[in-house]
Amino acid sequence: MPKGVIAVDVGSRQVRAGLFDLAGTLVAHARHDIALGQHSNAMATYRMEEIWAAVCATVADCGAQARTHDLTVTGLAFDATSSLYVDNAGSPIADGQGNIFGWMDHRAQQESAEINATRHPYLRFFGGAISPEIHLPKIVWYERHRSDDRTGTVCFRDVCDELARRATGVDARSRSALVCKWPFVPSEDAPWQRDLLAALGLGGHGGPDLVEGAVRDLGDVHGRLTTAAARQLGLPEGVVVGVGAIDAEAGVLGNVGANLDAIIGRTLLMTGGTSTNFMAFSADPHFIAGVWGPFRDAVFPGLWMHEGGQSFSGGALDAVLRQHPASPGEPAADTHRQAAADILALLAEEGRQFAAQKHLVPDWLGNRAPLNDSRVRTIMSGLGQELDYRSFLESYYATARGLALQMRQVVDHLNAHGYAIDTIHLSGGHRHNPLLVQLYADCFDGALHLCEAPEPVLSGTAMIAAVAAGHYPTLRAATARMSTKTRLVERNAARAAQLDADYGVYLRLYEVRNEIFRASLPM
């Protein structure tokens, strides 16, 4: 009987599962919404029990479809947003909140500033400053604000690790998640940064004893399904569960292509969704101000990875639809598709005259790269009364253009510090927006390729499951066999020239915004 694997992706608002054959073909999939508790602009939480229930429902659905397709499920793996689960005997993070800090939870701004003030050498691996999106500031915040009696043991885990623990009963840590989000540097003899933890009051209880344990690579076996978990997930007991990943790193696997060597130092792996991740690999470490990394062993053993990004990209376009007075409706595939089509028609008719005065720097939730400061916000010029549909289209276009120009800025910054990026692989939801795709292609002085995998993040997680189940010896071998092709997007020369001029405006506005931000800081 042919074999297959199941991949699970826990996104910002939805759990998705996919059934794959061993050639990387998506055979079936299932989805289940989850609730994001948005308590303020700074706070965002989830409930682990709700996520686990959604995981069980989607995996069981894929398991049933596997039987329909005569596939034997031999492997399972999880990826999730880089959200932090707090295991404290069911106690919530705070009153009325869940037990998971969402990746976009920025409540630990003060704690981030305190960590950055230490000037610890660890900060070099985050471009010089740590963001509240990283786990350490959240852990410090929690230890200062927890309301329980403090007598029990508290454990902190990435959501991908907690899912694998619930499935197998084995408490182990994904090296990939540790490298990217924890004070863990595998290139050093003592990876855990114990002195930094002690300086932050996390020695002993709340320190390395809480977060250390078995550390395993992507593609390793985390464990096997227990009897109880198998019953909940609708799969046979003993199915192999692979070590999990953060969704961005899983997306890299689904987007890297069949020839890993060809992309080292030259290709930006771009996954666009609610947020956007820019990943680049190098054979040697480069310490680049304003860019997270270099992270060794984050995906492939021995390779170093940088991670730039935009914390609010697809979410920004959703916000235009949700907030503009002349919006045609709530964010949905159809409203985005119609807005993109109408804008492309106006650009074809009017050229540079369309939205000529509207420009912005798209940092609604801080700047991940190249400034690496979570406190800055968007600046926009050219706002009018905003009463009609055209003004909506101009605001939507200015936002999309700003996102594309910032992508170009990140590429320029990486290329000024050791990279020679001449190719982009684009995956994620953004590839379904024809306006964004064309803007990315026209802004970039190189080749933009669309990843043709229908679910690249799930594809990457399926590769992890396939390696763990023994079908491929390494992730490199799995990408060579399970990757899908890419499609080149043609660049529009006339629009590229227009965007060159717009880039100059963007850079001036970026500097003005930064000057205003610095001047507004407390004395």
Image (cartoon, rainbow, N blue to C red):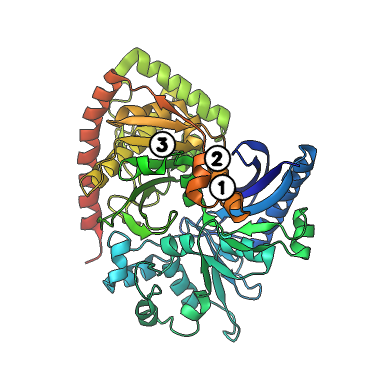
Numbered circle sitting on residue 429: none
Separation of disc 3 and disc 1 at Cα?
18 Å
Identify which amino acid the numbered label 1 is placed on: Met
Numbered circle sitting on residue 482: 2
- Residue 155 as seen in the image, left or right of residue 295: right
Identify which amino acid the numbered label 3 is placed on: His
Quadrant of residue 424 within the rendered picture = top left
> Is the residue marked by circle 1 packed among few (<14), some (14-19), or many (20+) residues within 10 Å?
many
Which residue lies under the disc numbered 3? 425
**Residue 392 at x, y percent in the picture:** 43, 28
**Residue 151 at x, y percent in the picture:** 59, 87
Numbered circle sitting on residue 463: 1
Asked whether the residues under the numbered discs 1 and 2 touch, taking CB atoms below 8 Å apart as contact, a structural biologist would say yes
Separation of disc 1 and disc 2 at Cα?
7 Å
Residue shown at 64% from the left, 69% from the top = 170
Q: Earlier in the sequence, mark 1 or mark 2?
A: 1
Image quadrant for the C terminus? Answer: bottom left
Residue shown at 62% from the left, 50% from the top = 8
